[in-house]
Image: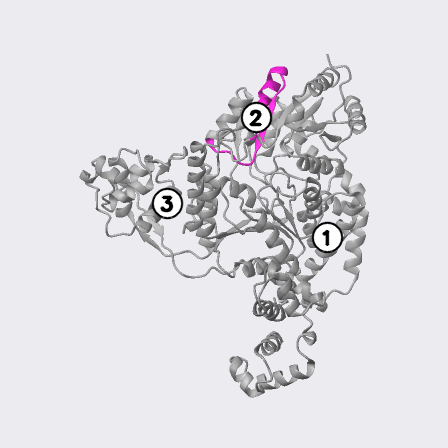
Amino acid sequence: MIINPPTTPTFDSLEQALKHFFGYDSFRPGQKPIIQAALDDRDLLVIMPTGGGKSLCFQLPALLSSGITIVVSPLIALMQDQVEALRDNGIGATFLNSTLNSMEVRQRAIRILDGEIKLLYVAPERLLTEQFLTFLTQINDRLGIARIAIDEAHCLSEWGHDFRPEYRQLLDLRQYYPSVPFLALTATATERVRQDIIQQLDLRQPIVHVASFNRQNLYYEVRPKQKQSYTELLNIIRQTSGSGIVYCLSRKRVDEITYRLQQDGVEALPYHAGMEDRDRAKNQNRFIRDDVRVMVATIAFGMGINKPDVRFVIHYDLPRNLEGYYQESGRAGRDGELARCILFFSYSDVKTVEFLISQKLDPVTNDPLEEEQRIASQQLRRVIDYAEANECRRTIQLSYFGETFAGSCHNCDNCKHPKPAEDWTIEAQKFLSCVARCKERFGMKYIIDVLRGSKEKRILANQHDQLSTYGIGKDHTADEWKGLGRSLLHQGLLDETSDGYGVLKLNPLSWEVLRKQRSVAIALPNRSTAENLTSDRSKANVELLLDRLRSLRKQIADEQSVPPYVVFPDGSLRQMAEEQPHTLDAFSEISGVGSYKLAQYGTRFLEAIRQFCGEDASSPQAALDPTSIALPHPKPLLSKTHFFTLELHQRGLTPDAIAEKRNLSLGTVIEHLVLLVEADRAVTLDSLVPPERQAQIQQAIQSVGADSLRTIRDRLGESFDYSEIRLVRAKWRHE
């Protein structure tokens, strides 16, 4: 029997409650029916992409229901961020995790049992301890448990991209509280993963809501990875305002890219599993609070990130699977504003991932985990297909999750710069016919081998050299057939099993092609280089006011020790800058301004807006428009070894001493110094070449040009050596 049920406020509509608690006038697509079903005490499985507003689907019902909502969350940082955001809206929320000492736990337990808390966040490994189950019984007896929400529910499934064994024990919770409704939520889940979640949680006649996976505000692009890719990365970061994430495959790469970005004046921090927990937490906190712009990370920087205003996510190395890539790139633009997602692709990265897959071994026997390796290899092939594809990037992503997408998205590199398309209907009929005649039992490589008349032993053993489709595709290369096969899969005209074997299967659309009821066009590659994305910018005065509001937000956030987006998201600030409200009533109409935040922050933001509008901001603004600022020319590509040489030079060591200390040749050290001078680093040239000799060398360069070192030296005479000429020429070239 519930001893002390807390009172719950009443509202005329869900929209009224939404505005009161969170400051928003309307729901995002899908949120309202989910919330209504939760209030009707239904079990739910919600698949909603990052940025779609999953959290609100259990937070608002918690505030409109009697009792406490228990939220199971896998990462400490994630639950802390959500609790901070709720508290900043004046909502009773707390968490219990390993960061708290025993006194803090007791204090929070008292507040919970006194009815001050509506949402309690807890990690799955703590939830089922004997001590916590006893506490849950007290909560249920005194207040009632309204519902149990399982966030990141894909962790339940072995078929998900981030399986966690401790999540499997949550089924026990259903047995302890059979009448309490369960709400499972995740951003990504294939059909197989969805069914596994339902089974593992014993969801009872659940309402399954699968939102569109299409994030329309994200621009997707794939670039070839080459020697100058770091320069491209640097330019992307310099050209794109706001914060971003750079993902790398290894800890070593994270440290290297972080170091180089820092040396190039970018505020960047690393994040990977090789760091101490406190250092990772510190770096993540600094990134979330806008103390630094860029986080360079391995996938260890995953579900814990709850920063809605990330403007770019760059995969400098190849991701391991398409689902993981969708999740990681989806951390951009969670506030609905425009953001960029760029993947650098190279076959050397493919080899690296293949090596990592080969290291999947049984921890006891050290034998290869063949099934896991097979599934991982197929997932890698799908990433390669995505990177090499000429079709719309969204079509490929969405088809992976079983969602169809027709036409051009107009917001990816392939749609903005389309390749020429050709009618390949006849070739498609040959391909699909071969799949049919091989009894739908083989993968793409085998089908292509049959089409091209391979003498491979397995083909002969299966007598597939006797098929009518054997050898009918010799007029096209294996790569061309592979491109067609990928295109058929991307367009939904062919299916592929996801068991690791990648067996091709015909579907109803395949038969339409075979019966000449549907034509097939495929995009062919060309050599044109996609232009960099340039987004439309608001007028200069809006941007200037927006910068001022961001500074105020950062100041308030630091005062309260919370991330800036907790105060207001970027979308709210932009609306303030565009509409420039001058009264509290007008300010309350801004999206994201609820009753609590209006009282907390309204006056300070209005004061900043009024002050800005009272200033003369006409002509100088155009000069400060970021679109008019010329970016620096690309500088020489520097690495850690160059910067180590620079550090020793700045300590006063001569080139000979640097060479001896580093066990390098003198020529290598001079080469480092030349590159550092060209890159405008703090090299004291006067300590390397006397000023009077510099003047003579510069005169010679002006007379004979800078192309030939020999010509310059002939002009100067044998008393000058090539090293000092190269150093002075480097300075001349830079200037």
Choose between 639 and 583: the one closer to the eye.
Answer: 639
Disc 2 versus disc 1: distance between alpha carbons? 38 Å
Q: Give the amino acid at mark 2.
A: Leu
Q: Give the amino acid at mark 1.
A: Arg
Q: Nearer the viewer, mark 1 or mark 3?
A: 3
Choose between 266 and 207: the one closer to the eye.
Answer: 266
Regarding residue 239, the answer to whether it shows in the image is: no
- What quarter of the picture does the C terminus occupy? bottom right
Secondary element under disc 1, as helix, strand or loop, is helix
Q: Give the amino acid at mark 3.
A: Arg
Disc 2 versus disc 3: distance between alpha carbons? 35 Å
Q: Which mark is residue 44?
A: 2
Q: Is residue 639 left or right of residue 432?
A: right
Residue pointed to by mark 1: 550
Q: Is residue 314 magenta?
A: no
The residue that appears at 61% across and 25% down in the rendered structure is 38
Mark 2 neighbour density, 10 Å: few (under 14) some (14–19) many (20 or more):
many
Mark 3 neighbour density, 10 Å: few (under 14) some (14–19) many (20 or more):
many
Residue pointed to by mark 3: 486
Q: Is residue 394 above or below residue 59?
A: below
Choose between 371 and 304: the one closer to the eye.
Answer: 371
Q: Is residue 410 above or below residue 54?
A: below
Corner quadrant of residue 456: top left
